[in-house]
Image (cartoon, rainbow, N blue to C red):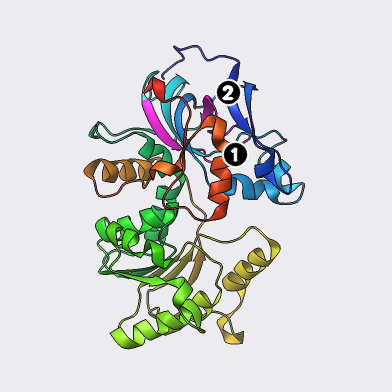
Amino acid sequence: MATAASHSPSYQSAAQLDACSDPISSIRVNHLAKVPVFPKSGIATIVRVLYASIDPIDYKLLSIPWPVPRLVVGSSPIIPGTSYVGRVCKTTHPGLEVGDIVWGKHTASTKFGTCASFTLISGDQGIVKIPSEWTPGRGIDEFAGAGVVALTALQTLQAGQATGGNVFINGGSGGVGTFTVQMAKHCFNCARVVVSCSGANADFVKSLGADEVVDYRSCGNEGLSGWLSEWSRQTGEMFDVIIDNVGSDPNVYWQCHHYLKAAGSRYVQVGGGMDFGSFAMLAKKMLWPTVIGGGKRKFQFLATQTKQEDFQLIGRWMAEGKIKTVIEDDNRFGLADVGKAYMKLDSGRIRGKIIIQIDANNE
């Protein structure tokens, strides 16, 4: 097995926040934060983080009333961030050596996230090497942006058995959505990719591979489900799979029998709120029987699983140029501005991913 050959300090620079009603307001940078302790047994890797990316779950989970955050993540302060790209500093992973450039995500919510100089990756599923075919002209920060969202996009399309079919993607301009659109068209070879987003993002989403775009703000009184019903009536086609990255409009599911095929189709939801009403609606979709007014198509809420082989597949597609992480210039922040980055993320007006530069000098 690979063994430690590089010294990691006891203290580091890290963004920290607290579990409270407004976690974003508590964000600060601590230059004397403790480095996670390397375990005495099992497979683990200390990574010197070069770039990290942020996701809504980082702060939304911490805003749930006590004791949920304490039980799931741990006590405050908490270092946010799940996805990363960096250099191996210390490892017992049999496939890695000190100095390797690696990427991936934490397998579960953790007190010691990736918005820090160092992060501890437990096990062998949430960490892989950058593919040897990676083009030097493209920044490795793309891998930091891919961890959570590319994995989610891949697994929703796999769950929906989307290969070659007609797919509707609800929410196509965010982190998960941009990867779902690209994978649907360029990796799963979907026949028709229809995507919802704001009108301002229509051309952008089409550039990623969407065949048709609907502005969810301009669907009329019957909303998005009404537009989809009319689309099906006019085209004479129905969808084989619906990927719901938003989850805020329950009628998209309740009415989907008008535009989602009866046989072999899937409605896969991955997005949704963290409040009681959202959880109740999700339970209703999953459990309410059709015979007493429930949904008429198969519904699945996807819980993403961290899989090494999925990261390797995503990395290969990225190296081949089939997919990319969308990182706009004004979505790059330094560690000192993590609070501003999360405020922008919380605004909902984001295309692609927000990247946090931690230690790019060590690339």
**Residue 72 in view of the camera:** no
From what the image shows, is residue 140 above or below residue 291? above
Label 1 neighbour load within 10 Å: few <14, some 14-19, many 20+: many
Q: Identity of the amino acid at label 1?
A: Gly
Task: Measuring from the top left, give residue 133's x and y in whole percent.
Answer: 22, 34
Q: Identity of the amino acid at label 2?
A: Ser
Task: Measuring from the top left, give residue 130's x and y in whole percent.
Answer: 33, 33
Q: Does the segment drawn in magenta span residue 124?
A: no
Q: Does the segment drawn in magenta span residue 117?
A: yes
SS type, badge 2? strand
Numbered disc in front, either 1 or 2: 1
What residue is at 34 percent from the left and 60 percent from the top? 205
What residue sits right under mark 1 in the picture?
339
**Separation (CA) of disc 1 from disc 2:** 15 Å
Q: Which residues are magenta?
A: 101-121
Quarter location, residue 342: top right
* Residue placed most toward the observer, 346 or 151: 346
- Residue farthest along the right direction in this orientation: 66
**Residue 149 in view of the camera:** yes
* Residue placed most toward the observer, 308 or 227: 227
From what the image shows, is residue 97 above or below residue 278? above
